[in-house]
Image: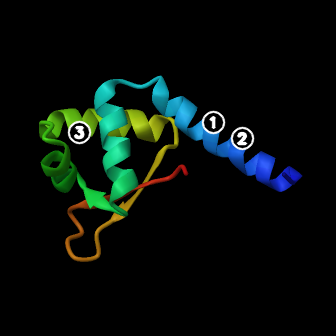
């Protein structure tokens, strides 16, 4: 195993370690984003069967730990699209 592989694995573990300390709703949202490349808040609510308010809270907690990235949707500028920012 090379030094770069070890460094990459350590960075990946740090990202998921931070998620492990979050509430279950944040873990569920992170897993949904892991399986789907990008989702909006409403799509996340549909995918996880969580209330929209819980999804917003989970996303804010994930953003605090730099676990998700967001950008404005190209099809509807009122919506944000979220992607998982850890491996």
Q: Is residue 59 left or right of residue 49?
A: right
Q: Is residue 28 left or right of residue 46?
A: right
Residue 43 sits in which quadrant? bottom left
Label 3: few (<14), some (14–19) or many (≥20) C-alpha neighbours in 10 Å: many
Distance of label 3 from label 2 (alpha carbons)? 28 Å
Q: Position of residue 32 (x, y in %)?
A: 31, 49
Say which residue appears at 87% left-offset and 51% top-offset: 3
Distance of label 3 from label 1 (alpha carbons)? 23 Å
- Disc 3 element: helix
Tag 1 and tag 2, C-beta contact below 8 Å: yes
Q: Going by the picture, which residue comes out furthest to the front? A: 1
Q: Position of residue 55 (x, y in %)?
A: 23, 39
Say which residue appears at 62% left-offset and 38% top-offset: 13
Say which residue appears at 13% left-offset and 50% top-offset: 46
Q: Going by the picture, which residue comes out furthest to the right? A: 3
Residue that badge 1 annotates: 14
- Disc 1 element: helix
Between 3 and 58, the one nearer to me in the picture: 3
Name the mark nearer the viewer: 3 or 1: 1
Between 29 and 40, the one nearer to me in the picture: 29
Mark closest to the chain's N terminus, 3 or 2 = 2
The colour scheme is rainbow
Between 85 and 8, the one nearer to me in the picture: 8
Label 2: few (<14), some (14–19) or many (≥20) C-alpha neighbours in 10 Å: few
Whether 6 is drawn above or below 61: the answer is below
Residue 27 sits in which quadrant? top left
Distance of label 1 from label 2 (alpha carbons)? 6 Å
Say which residue appears at 28% left-offset and 59% top-offset: 39
- Disc 2 element: helix
Whether 47 is drawn above or below 81: the answer is above
Residue that badge 2 annotates: 10
Residue that badge 3 annotates: 55
């Amino acid at each position: 195993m090379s030094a770069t592989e070890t460094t990459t694995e350590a960075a990946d573990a740090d990202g998921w370690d931070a998620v492990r300390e979050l509430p279950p709703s944040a873990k569920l949202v992170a897993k949904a984003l892991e399986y789907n490349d990008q989702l909006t808040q409403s799509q996340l609510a549909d995918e996880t069967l969580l209330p929209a308010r819980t999804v917003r809270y989970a996303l804010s907690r994930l953003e605090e730990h730099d676990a998700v990235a967001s950008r404005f949707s190209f099809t509807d500028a009122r919506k944000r699209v979220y992607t998982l920012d850890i491996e």
